[in-house]
């Protein structure tokens, strides 16, 4: 009899959760095998071999320097006995060796250090983040009160981008797939999150500064220590470097004890005060509160939106005419009380999730529309490639499913739809990969999991998780609530089935086991068909048998009269089953941040004096679709601008009128910096120019046509090429001046 | 020196807050005047006079019955001495009097009871709510765990309605008015809500069952007691009835002590157990939590979205080019931990707010677009009408502003825009009124407040508050944060102004007042111009003067050398001031609920056997814009349905295909019940019929035109009359069968 090892759902799409389950996986799996697997993992994403060679080379050069320095010292100590020429030559040789050692150190530094590609990344990120903050895409929340770590506001353009991304998500998923959208509260009673496992397991390991009480994430401190050593300590032996890398690779799987041991071993102290640290202990990441006035009903701010869908399964199933498959979706706020938020906008304490739960018959995971996405080809990073140290490869989705790399068509269909969603938003397809979870990353009940990872200046970031979670979640809520969350398949004609029937004799079991009776009964009833048949045979031949009751932690003796086991034939009119759920889960804030990085570029101003910032947002994402500039201040142009303003408003196109008295070039630059795709310049009372942001090309269009042209362009009915073909191009005196 | 009496912002647009400030207003204003004012208020909304007459009539009849009964008893007691005829006559007279008394009791019951219009309202509400719950517009949250009071989910159609209402709100306000939208976290640090006054004052008074600990809202218990007495106790004297009504009228203003006294006086006990109750005490309605792992940083789930805007004022003002006026807007969740939520969907613990903060120069509250709304005429309920016991009247908005009924043009403009927003959503203009706050309802700093109230089965419900809050909120955050939240007006040429200059001599004050020096200095610096000039005159004539320092709670003696006071002429280049804010604040859930009631009607089925439910949602609100029905199951019709499906999806029109094998009439009825405005029936391979929900008229349209016709209708570009004129009408065999 196997007892299910508990791994809560949170940890399967780990992307938005910082945490891995705190099960001692190191101890649970054979240590050597685990170490081997992890070494491979760590190799997959680094250049261990060449780095090893560089470390060795540096060590050799350093040894040579030391030896030569000894020689020089000996010669000098000999005083006049040594010929001056000999000393000079030895010093020259020492210098040369030092130069060589220096070069080796720099090569190693470049290979491992944050000073290599890291600096460029950091610089690029600073440029993006500066623009984002200056233009109020983001604002650190409650700034006038010095803010709160991990909380950010979206300012006007950020808010518009977010609304556009969510509107497109609704169109692309909810509308096109006829999903059932729900909207549940954030405040959630404890029982729901006990059933889901969050109350018990949604934790990170924390250590405290023993004197000041300041809290740190234990794994962060260990990670920082290892990284810093690896990047800055050039005297590190290759063996020690390998050890630190191994620690980094298994970091997510370390138990509290293992983490604590490492922290002690490496002498890690509180970063700010150098005080000693407490032992690591779990800290639950949910914001706790109390519902109602008594203080007795514990509640939490939901850590994800999925549970609201699961608890509504029964109603939604009936709403859908008791038919499978169907999908429900929810967009909403989720909350995680991070111990010490880092990575700026990627790891925050409150964020918007968009989640889909697609309920499907576990015996039929085909998808009628899979054919629509089967020909898509994009970067996939299946388990095998990760384990063999290779990189992600271009794979056709249809092949990935037919070869079994992706578990089933429905999962494959969602991977394809997620790919289309992200690339249509403007995510660079060369910096997007679908990475399959390794076996140790997945919950035991999960059939298969893939993360859409987007590369940005922080590395590859998990932005969407797509998991086949089998029947786990619905079962958990069925068990806790006592309400069966199941589906029915009516047979066209009744089917004869053989069913295992186990009838414990409570009287005899009660006499034998007294207070333990209930646990023995449950264990008997939970036997698989094979276990039961084996027991039946044993009881019939020997009259009694040993039986392991895990909940008692021991074997008991079962006699023949204690239980009756038989296979009975029954006519069944329907099949009752718990549906499987396939869950695509989107971290909207992370997607938007990566989109900002992928959309950002700079170009030199016309005067070549400045670098100008541009966001190349596609029109559906752009916070403002067009700007209207009267070329110079006069009544005629202002009136024309008003006419255009009204037409744009009626057409529902977000726009701004910029009448500031600065050069048109400056106004274009200002508009490019918030990613406005089209700029309308009013330079006559009857016609205007429309400029496209990235090509800087302009066309001339009649005033009464402006709104419809911009609408076509922003709705995606026409491309810039289409309208360029239709309308005369413009290269006039008010042309591009940036 | 006047100290500002604190009245936090929450209480001015009281609509979404259950609470009134806990300031003892009864004691603060002259009792007689207050009582008089309140009596008038209570008269305005009841029929006190006729009810009084009925109570008196009943009491007289009852007295007559009692007297006659006494007569009968006396006659009977006399035994044979009384003639049988005399006794019979007396008994007959008693019967007649009893009949009269019974009739009087019924008349009174009808006038006061919930049994009158109340029953019809209740029935209507039940019909709406049943349909809403059955069709999953709403679902009690966490239903499988027996739910949580005051928390509701929006199911699929409810969610779509909500998304449509919010999209229209964005179009109508944010886009058309070029507002700056922001999106701030729900988790809010304590300091922000201390500044706003919520930590101290956002409370309701609570009593506890002294044995079980069950909590009740004190005012609810008192209200229930008074209402029940008034409705059911027909023996109530007119004087007692007047007293109870007075209590109801002043209920919101009662202090904890006053409430406690009344509860004791009336012998009110816990409703469920009849146990005695504790004294009332304030319970803060915010959900409290803790930010970060230390447990030391208190946070709350925001009770409104406005504060997120105020704390960002400075950045938003710069973003707007340092120009006033401008408006910022926010849509988001807000949280209130109600003591015992009632009124179903109207009073909930988590809800969506949409708030606008329009920042304006306090010296110029004109609005350039006021002319666009000046001619609107709708029900207004200004203060005077309420105080004189009249009802709301149709008023032209332009007149209300020009006569000064509405304080200023900007406030008037928003009232007009709110009217347009609500009526375009489908709120019945005859059940919508704008009610002005009475002086005792407003915060002392507010210039004027109007609530958009919508009548539904619960009475007139406050759904939008539109308040001119002056500079209160920005000042509160300036004071708390130390960051000036101000605007600047640059003068075209410098202006000469006379300014009061008060220079305390800290040395002399320090010698005189030691530890109290700071408070004296602050009090001196805070003097008004008149106070300072009076002091200057006194010091010059007498050399010293008494000066009241409120923070010390006593007078001190100020001598001439302690302070220098003068008026100095200065050249000023700009004016620095705190903007006023005009705040329209929308309770989205309440608006949606009222919309459901206003949109709901029933009609008899064709067979006259059933009442069919219909929601007459306008297309912009309808959760699904159209349904597609293949008339009978065949390949040809299914293929046509698929073509239409694809075209509708591409056009972004939410729709469902219903291929169930039930009669077309049933399918129409099902679609009417969730308010789908248009039903497309596929009855040929080339053309289809489109049916309009309310008129049940049908037109015939080619398959390739369906999507564009439905799009025009749902976008508001065409009306049903337009398309009926253009396309042939259809009265065919598949016509209406409901």
Image: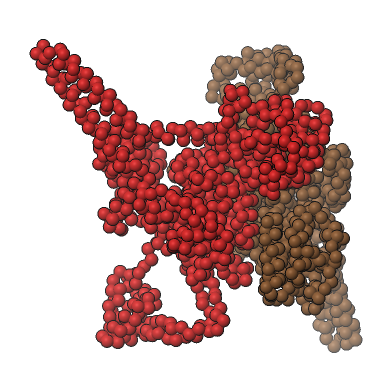
Chain colours: A brown, B red
User: Horizontal and vertical percent for residue B202?
Assistant: 44, 53
Question: In the image shown, does A134 or B53 lie closer to the viewer?
Answer: B53
Residue displayed at 55% across by 84% down: B493
Q: Looking at the picture, does residue A646 appear above or below residue B709?
A: below
Residue A699 is left or right of residue B30, and the answer is right
User: Horizontal and vertical percent for residue B504?
Assistant: 38, 82
User: Horizontal and vertical percent for residue A126?
Assistant: 71, 67
Question: In the image shown, does A444 or B627 lie closer to the viewer?
Answer: B627
User: Horizontal and vertical percent for residue B717?
Assistant: 69, 49
Which of the 4 quarters of the picture holds residue B604? top right
Quarter containing the N terminus of chain B: bottom left
Residue A514 is left or right of residue B690, and the answer is left
Q: Is residue B31 visible?
A: yes
Quarter containing the C terminus of chain B: top right
Question: In the image shown, does A209 or B142 lie closer to the viewer?
Answer: B142
Residue A564 is left or right of residue A68, and the answer is left
Total number of numbered labels? Answer: 0
Q: Looking at the picture, does residue A671 appear above or below residue A662?
A: above
Question: In the image shown, does B452 or B378 lie closer to the viewer?
Answer: B378
Residue displayed at 50% across by 73% down: B577
Q: Is residue A367 visible?
A: no
Residue displayed at 41% across by 59% down: B443
Which of the 4 quarters of the picture holds residue A493? top right
Residue displayed at 77% across by 76% down: A610
């Amino acid at each position: 009899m196997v007892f299910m090892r508990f791994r809560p759902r949170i940890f399967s799409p780990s992307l938005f959760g910082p945490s891995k389950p705190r099960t001692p996986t190191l101890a649970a799996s054979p240590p050597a095998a685990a170490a081997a697997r992890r070494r491979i993992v760590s190799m997959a994403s680094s250049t261990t071999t060449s780095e090893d060679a560089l470390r060795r080379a540096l060590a050799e050069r350093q040894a040579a320097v030391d030896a030569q320095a000894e020689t020089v010292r000996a010669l000098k100590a000999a005083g006049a006995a040594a010929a001056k020429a000999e000393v000079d030559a030895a010093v020259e040789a020492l210098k040369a060796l030092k130069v060589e050692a220096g070069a080796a150190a720099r090569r190693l530094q470049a290979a491992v250090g944050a000073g290599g590609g890291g600096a460029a990344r950091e610089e690029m990120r600073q440029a993006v983040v500066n623009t984002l903050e200056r233009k109020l895409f983001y604002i650190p929340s409650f700034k006038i009160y010095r803010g709160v770590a991990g909380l950010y506001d979206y300012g006007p353009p950020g808010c518009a981008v977010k609304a556009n991304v969510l509107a497109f998500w609704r169109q692309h998923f909810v509308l096109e797939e006829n999903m059932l959208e729900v909207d549940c509260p954030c405040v959630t009673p404890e029982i729901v999150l006990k059933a889901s496992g969050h109350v018990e397991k949604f934790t990170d390991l924390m250590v405290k500064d023993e004197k000041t009480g300041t809290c740190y994430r234990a794994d962060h401190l260990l990670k920082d220590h290892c990284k810093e050593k690896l990047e800055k300590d050039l005297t590190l032996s290759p063996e020690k470097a390998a050890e630190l890398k191994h620690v980094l690779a298994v970091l997510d799987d370390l138990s509290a004890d293992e983490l604590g041991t490492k922290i002690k071993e490496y002498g890690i102290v509180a970063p700010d005060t150098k005080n000693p640290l407490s032992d690591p202990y779990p800290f639950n990441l949910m914001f706790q509160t109390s519902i109602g006035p008594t203080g007795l009903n514990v509640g939490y701010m939901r850590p994800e939106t999925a549970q609201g869908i699961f608890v509504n399964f029964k109603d939604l199933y009936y709403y859908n005419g008791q038919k499978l498959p169907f999908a429900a979706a929810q967009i909403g706020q989720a909350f995680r009380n991070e111990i010490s938020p880092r990575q700026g906008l990627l790891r925050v304490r409150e964020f918007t999730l968009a989640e889909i739960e697609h309920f499907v018959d576990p015996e039929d995971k085909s998808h009628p529309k899979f054919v629509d996405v089967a020909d898509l080809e994009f970067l996939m990073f299946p388990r095998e490639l990760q384990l063999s140290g290779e990189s992600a490869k271009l794979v056709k989705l249809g092949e990935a499913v037919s070869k079994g790399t992706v578990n089933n068509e429905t999962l494959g269909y969602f991977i394809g739809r997620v790919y289309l969603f992200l690339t249509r938003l403007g995510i660079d397809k060369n910096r997007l990969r679908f990475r399959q979870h390794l076996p140790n990353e997945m919950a035991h009940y999960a059939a298969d999991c893939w993360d859409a990872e987007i590369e940005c200046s922080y590395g590859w970031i998990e932005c969407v998780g797509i998991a086949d979670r089998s029947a786990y979640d619905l079962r958990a809520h069925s068990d806790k609530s006592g309400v069966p969350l199941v589906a029915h398949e009516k047979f066209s004609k009744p089917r004869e089935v053989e069913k295992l029937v186990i009838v414990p004799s409570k009287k005899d079991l009660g006499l034998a086991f007294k207070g333990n009776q209930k646990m023995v009964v449950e264990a008997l009833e939970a036997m698989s068909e094979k276990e039961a048949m084996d027991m039946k045979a044993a009881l019939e031949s020997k009259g009694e048998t040993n039986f392991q009751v895990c909940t008692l932690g021991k074997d008991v003796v079962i006699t023949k009269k204690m239980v009756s086991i038989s296979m009975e034939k029954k006519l069944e009119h329907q099949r009752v089953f718990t549906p499987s759920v396939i869950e695509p889960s989107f971290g909207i804030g992370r997607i938007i941040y990566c989109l900002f990085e992928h959309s950002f570029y700079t170009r030199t101003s016309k005067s070549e004096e400045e670098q100008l910032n541009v966001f190349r947002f596609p029109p559906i994402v752009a916070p403002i679709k067009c700007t209207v500039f009267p070329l110079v201040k006069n009544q005629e142009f202002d009136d024309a601008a008003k006419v255009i303003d009204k037409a744009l408003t009626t057409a529902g196109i977000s726009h701004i009128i910029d009448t500031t008295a600065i050069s048109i070039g400056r106004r274009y630059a200002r508009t490019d910096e918030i990613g406005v795709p089209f700029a309308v310049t009013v330079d006559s009372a009857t016609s205007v120019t429309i400029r496209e942001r990235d090509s800087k090309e302009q066309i001339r269009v009649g005033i009464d046509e402006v709104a419809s042209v911009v609408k076509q362009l922003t709705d995606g009915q026409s491309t810039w090429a289409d309208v360029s073909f239709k309308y005369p191009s413009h290269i006039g005196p008010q042309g591009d001046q940036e």
